[in-house]
Image (spheres, helix red, strand yellow):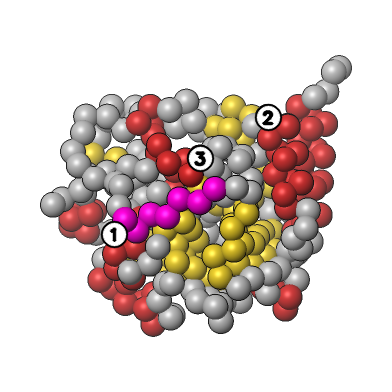
Amino acid sequence: MTHPICVTCGVQYGEPREDCPICLDERQYVGWDGQRWTTLEELRAAGHRGEVAQEGEDVFGVGAAPPTSIGQRALLVRTPSGNVLWDMITYIDDDVVRQVRELGGVSAIAISHPHFYGSMIEWAHAFDAPVYIHEADRQWVARPDDAVRFWSGDTLEIADGLTLINAGVHFAGGQVLHWRDAEDGEGALFTGDILHVVQDRRWVSFMWSYPNLIPERPRTIRRALRLLEPYHFRRVYGGWWKRIVSTDGKAAVQRSFDRYVDFALDDG
């Protein structure tokens, strides 16, 4: 079966349909030319290829060139406990699978939020890997499959030193990944755009909708920071190539929130 892919968000669906619920949601948008669909076969024929490049120590970006949909890249996090593919892209072919296998393959997949679901089932099947999604985002899974493992609660350790945290920013099930042993034990946080690394890469930001510029509620962000409090991290890896806070990551998140609240709650 050829599975349809929404051109705007890049999410692959299990069967043909007329609309994309992810794009109809207020956090996203239907493309200006209306709802359009493609397939992996069409993307390959159009000249898209996989792209793998190092983004940090034992962290490799996995993307597509030229980019598809919103252009994010995934991250292969290589650890002694197994490799985690953090976040997801739309594109996959035999060559990019080979490149990832040469780096040790994928033991588990975890994705920050529905806009990044991409072709997650194709990747799961290619590596026989489970996909961890928080149950609060169950309704957005566009291609149901036994590979998807829904979890509940605030945190889940998916391997030694690798913990998913339900930050709840952007989506109720929005999750980030903490790697305890990264950066010589100082830790790293992988955030997609749950905590969005901005152009000035000393800061992050928090939005309910990025394309429609709807800010996140401060109380939601406060909860996320409370959950992050026990975890140390020097680096923050965002959702696009080179969107990385390279040092002092935990302080960067806190000062970014302080600035956010100062502007959001300014009473004049």
Q: Residue at x 64, y 67 (%)?
A: 179
Quick one: label 1 or label 2, which is nearer the N terminus?
1
Q: Residues within 10 Å of mark 2 (few under 14, many from 20)?
A: some
The image position of residue 99, as x and y in percent, is: 36, 77
**Magenta span:** 146-152
- Residue position for label 2: 217
Left or right of 93, for residue 200: right
Residue 5 on the magenta segment: no
The image position of residue 49, as x and y in percent, is: 30, 63
Q: Amino acid at mark 2?
A: Arg
- Residue position for label 3: 136
Numbered marks: total: 3
Q: Which mark is residue 235?
A: none
Q: Residues within 10 Å of mark 3 (few under 14, many from 20)?
A: some
The image position of residue 198, as x and y in percent, is: 64, 47
Quick one: label 3 or label 1, which is nearer the N terminus?
1
Element on which disc 2 rests: loop
Q: Residue at x 48, y 44 (%)?
A: 135
Element on which disc 1 rests: helix
- Residue position for label 1: 122
Q: Residues within 10 Å of mark 1 (few under 14, many from 20)?
A: some
Tell me which corner region of the image, top left, top right, bottom left or bottom right, holds residue 181: bottom right
Q: CA distance from mark 3 to mark 2?
A: 17 Å
